[in-house]
Amino acid sequence: MDKTQRVDSAGLKSSQSLPPTPPPLHGRTALFRHSFHYCEENGFVCFKFQGMSVAILGPTFQDLAENVNRNISNLSLIFVGRATGFLCGTTIGGILFDHMNQFFLLGASMVATTVTLYLIPFCKTAVLLIITMSAFGASVGVVDTGANVLILALWGDKGAPHMQALHFSFALGAFLAPLLAKLAWGTTASAQNHTESDFDPLMLNRTSEAATDSVFAVPDDMNLLWAYASIGTYVLVVSVFLFALFCEKRSKQKKSSASAQEVRRAKYHRALLCLLFLFFFFYVGAEITYGSYVFSFATTHVGMEESEAAGLNSIFWGTFAACRGLAIFFATCLRPGTMIVVSNIGSLASSFFLVLFDKSPLCLWIATSVYGASMATTFPSGISWIEQYTTLTGKSAAFFVIGAALGEMAIPAVIGILQGHYPDLPVVLYTCLCSAIFTAVLFPVMYKLATLPLERQRKGRRKSEDQKALPTSSRL
């Protein structure tokens, strides 16, 4: 019966829910299945673009600072603006996805992302660049929530491999973005522009005058323009396919499936969401903290060379992306809860050895690889796990995505302050260990809370069946 219900919730029509008319049934099933695979592929492409568009800021940050005639330290508010916009977009998107067509919202938000990507290289003032980056973050936040909701709507609790593939596409896009920015378009022109602007005072005067005369202007470094324009064009092409899906008007089947999914709601639905909010807050915060500070930690605390520290940083994100790809195959034979437990054990063990041997370069290399691999599958596995016990709506998905975003903002900022006050202590490693302990303790609590109502329901069903059987036996 569960299989029949899941097939129905994915939009397919089974033989038990319709009159026995086999020929038209199989034709419709094949058509719907083809449509849903097409929707799923568009979701993967959406997350791939999101990874590219988010990661492109890192390798082009220096070029953007030169474009607005500012130093990097004076342009740090660009990250705050993007994060603020992302939180607003996630919140608004979670509300809208419950009341509007998902394909239309995804397509519209990707068009908005295209516009902001086109405008970013033309911004000549820091204020305008921060505002544009905030709008970019808002549109990306809508896509982030929408892609997760789309996979859950198509596959429900059977979509663990598809959820892993969705988040692997994000890691793939983040991996390709620096290559596109620095290898495909090159850095020669950018380096020349930086040299000229640093040593020629007349060039500085012309740049400042041009910045004051015009708010929008063609950037001096055309490679900066082509890097953002190429990603923006890619996003625009994907949005066309999403609008094509919207024009097919398949939303009626999805609305009927949503009403069927509303039946599966855990008794402690809100409590589970709050615990998952905290789980993702500490998990994502630890992930971003280690990925951001491992370079400086290796150079200042361990005494590594900058080239070795850069390789250590690459090892962390490389194992992270590789294990997200392997998780697609692991999710076909392992349950999401099992993958979360394995990830928690790996992150707990690796962070413990990092704290225990914080001065050992060999331990740092090995434990960093294990830590990156352990952190890879937790987020998509957590979404697939909770979908097994309670149905996630757009608002629900937005809620725990906001928790992850807040952890990404708050924990690295606090660690930066603490590291300045206690430079001799491995604050980064202590944070990762504490986060691993917290998530390892929190998940069994979440599991018990999710399964306890199910056990009570089973006992209630057994009692009702026994009561129904009593009158029958009395008659006999």
Image (spheres, rainbow, N blue to C red):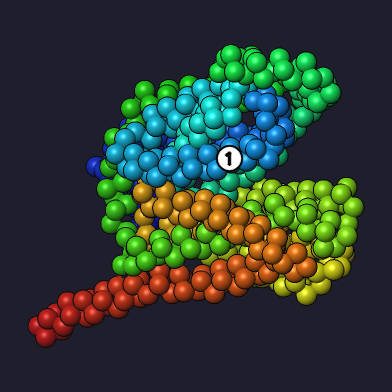
Residue 45 higher or lower than 263, as above or below = above
Identify which residue, 277 or 137, lies in the foreground. Answer: 137
Residue 190 as seen in the image, left or right of residue 88: right
Q: Where is residue 54 drawn, in percent x and y?
A: 60, 37
Q: Where is residue 113 drawn, in percent x and y?
A: 51, 28
Q: In which quarter of the image is residue 301?
A: bottom right
Q: Is mark 1 on a helix, strand or loop?
A: helix
Quarter that holds the C terminus = bottom left
Residue 116 as seen in the image, left or right of residue 426: left
Identify which residue, 309 or 197, lies in the foreground. Answer: 197
Identify which residue, 284 or 150, lies in the foreground. Answer: 284
Q: What residue type is labelled 1?
A: Leu
Residue 334 as seen in the image, left or right of residue 269: right
Residue 338 seen in render = no
Residue 163 seen in render = yes
Q: Where is residue 169 drawn, in percent x and y?
A: 61, 40
Quarter that holds the N terminus = bottom left
Q: Where is residue 69 drawn, in percent x and y?
A: 68, 26
Q: In which quarter of the image is residue 63?
A: top right
Q: In which quarter of the image is residue 108?
A: top left
Rendered residue at 59%/18% (across/down): 212
Rendered residue at 46%/51% (across/down): 402
Identify the residue position indicated by label 1 in the image.
77
Using a 10 Å C-alpha cutoff, classify the residue at mark 1 as few (fewer than 14 neighbours), some (14 to 19) or many (20 or more).
Answer: some
